[in-house]
Amino acid sequence: MTHTCDSAWLERFPELEMLIPSTALQARVQQLGEQITRDYCMHPPLLVGVLKGSLVFLADLMRAIPLPVAYDFVAVSSYGDETYSTGQVRLIKDLDSPIRDRHVLLVEDIYDTGLTLEYLLGQLRQRQPASLRVCALLSKPARHQVPIELAYCGFEIPDRFVVGYGLDYAERYRNLPFIAVLNTV
Ligand code: IMP
């Protein structure tokens, strides 16, 4: 069911089609937080967010993990058009601190082809963290090109271009409190 707050957004953006309402998103993020809290209670993780897409998810997720976690960010650029990456990934912002012997949980907005995650996991693994796992809000199984093990996954979604809750199209729509399909793409 579409929440009334979501409806106000949809009226303003007729190109959007609701996929995951904000109430469902929030409930799932809480569940992921509980799962992560149970799994990491003996060794609180460093949450590593991938800018910019994971920002909103990470902000909600960390507040659902009542453990002494820290967070840091990486940013990558991929050469490609505005909707899909070409797989040429480059690190444009590195972590602030070393991660050797730390328990790292990489937090990503979406596992699409998996090329970004594969690249980042390779980069981070070289630094010898105590553990390295992935939490992705969304996964598009129809688009996967490389296998990535997701320790935590919010939702599997169909092969549609989605925006909102951090995800953008040409920097727009990141501030939607829900995930929607962008019909013009
Ligand atoms: P990859 O193809 O798994 O490497 O995903 C690369 C990046 O493309 C993701 O981190 C997202 O930022 C972006 N992306 C992939 N699919 C979508 C989508 O449906 N909407 C918005 N961004 C997307």
Image (tube, grey):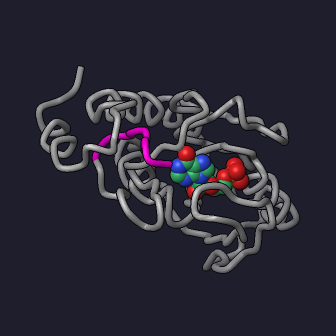
Q: Which residues are magenta?
A: 177-185
Residue at the location (37% across, 31% down)? Answer: 20
Question: Is 139 a magenta residue?
Answer: no
Residue at the location (72% across, 71% down)? Answer: 79
Question: Is 179 a magenta residue?
Answer: yes
Relative to 28, residue 53 above or below? below
- Where is residue 60 shown, x and y percent of the image? 36, 48
Q: Which of the 4 image quadrants contains residue 142?
A: top right
Residue at the location (69% across, 29% down)? Answer: 141
How many numbered marks, from 0 up? 0
Q: Is residue 101 left or right of residue 38?
A: right
Which of 15 and 57 lies nearest the eye of the viewer?
15
Instruction: Answer yes or no: is residue 165 visible.
Output: yes
Residue at the location (55% across, 36% down)? Answer: 160
Instruction: Answer yes or no: is residue 46 visible.
Output: no
Q: Which of the 4 image quadrants contains residue 98?
A: bottom right
- Where is residue 134 shown, x and y percent of the image? 67, 44
On-image quarter of the N terminus: top left
Q: Is residue 91 left or right of residue 63?
A: right
- Where is residue 172 shown, x and y percent of the image? 38, 63
Which of 85 and 24 lies nearest the eye of the viewer?
85
Relative to 131, residue 178 above or below? above
